[in-house]
Amino acid sequence: MENTVAQKLEALKKLQAIDSQLVEIKKIRGDLPEEVEDLEDEIAGYNTRITKFEEELTAYKETIKEHKASIKEYQERIAYLEDQQMNVRNNREYDAINKELEMLGLDTQVSEKRIREAKIAIEAKEEQIGMTKQMLDERQKDLDAKQVELKEILSETEVEEEKLLKQREKASKNIEERLLNAYNKIRINSSNGLAVVPVRRGACGGCFNAVPPQKQADIKEKRKIIVCEHCGRLMSDVEIVIEEEKKKTTRKRSVRRKKAE
């Protein structure tokens, strides 16, 4: 049997009450979960940067090693050629040896230059690593403190939150899928998390725009689900307390008039 409009609205009000309590729990946590997540991402970035710097450092050291090996080979070849230069038989052989010695000398200078450049780069990279590690340590301390704070808050609220989530799951089953989807969409898009609101003092309890008297009468009858024409929130009822206050005010005015007469 399909639920009446009144039953549907009551189920939505119950769900809204549960969601509002969950919102309050999230308010207690504040921005801590996001701050922790941001710090974790920042620290991961620093670790990635350090790894990259260390890989570059290793490459520079390998470059130095390779050029030192090349210089050793050049020196051995130079020593050999200088020895052979003493036994040349003609000017052609002498010139050929001199040309090769000259090329080996230039190759040695190039390798020495590459070694100097690599050493300078290593110093700069080690300084970058040191600074990054320092920033990493500072952010890690911030993260540790935030995690402790968040853990304390979670330990205080997780039992209540788990209970509310179970209640929410149970309450959601009592609402037809189409209506539940509409409720969730409105709630997610609203700034205060309210999708179901009453009429208070003649205005929408969500956006505070005036609700026409005829529409208020329709809301009271609960023959159909009515939404606010301004914010789209579901209108659950018109607060009776307000009506009683109006009646009391009217009675007081009547009494005053009678006394004046």
Image (spheres, helix red, strand yellow):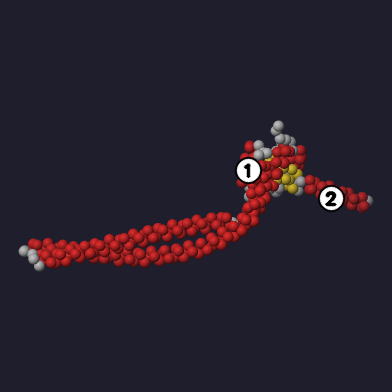
Furthest-top residue in view?
A: 1
Quadrant location of the N terminus? top right
- Locate residue 49: give its quadrant: bottom left
Q: Position of residue 196 (x, y in %)?
A: 69, 44
Q: Nearer the viewer, residue 127 or 70?
A: 70
Secondary structure found at label 1: helix
Q: Position of residue 157 (x, y in %)?
A: 64, 54
Which residue has dot 1 on it?
184
On the question of residue 187 being in view, the answer is yes
Instruction: Indicate left or right for 119 with 153 as reference.
Output: left
Q: Position of residue 201 (x, y in %)?
A: 76, 48
Residue appearing at x 55%, y 57% in the figure: 36
Instruction: Indicate left or right for 136 with 89 as reference.
Output: right
On the question of residue 231 being in view, the answer is no
Q: Nearer the viewer, residue 107 or 239?
A: 107
For disc 2, the neighbor class at 10 Å (few under 14, some 14 to 19, many from 20) is few
Q: Residue 62 shows which numbered tag?
A: none
Which residue has dot 2 on it?
249
Q: Earlier in the sequence, mark 1 or mark 2?
A: 1
Give the residue type at disc 2.
Thr
Q: Residue 148, relative to residue 18: is it above or below?
A: below
Give the residue type at disc 1.
Asn
Furthest-left residue in view?
A: 89
The answer for how far apart the CA atoms under marks 1 and 2 are is 39 Å
Q: Residue 122, relative to residue 199: is it above or below?
A: below
Q: Position of residue 75 (x, y in %)?
A: 20, 65
For disc 1, the neighbor class at 10 Å (few under 14, some 14 to 19, many from 20) is some
Residue appearing at x 35%, y 64% in the figure: 121
Residue appearing at x 42%, y 63% in the figure: 129
Secondary structure found at label 2: helix
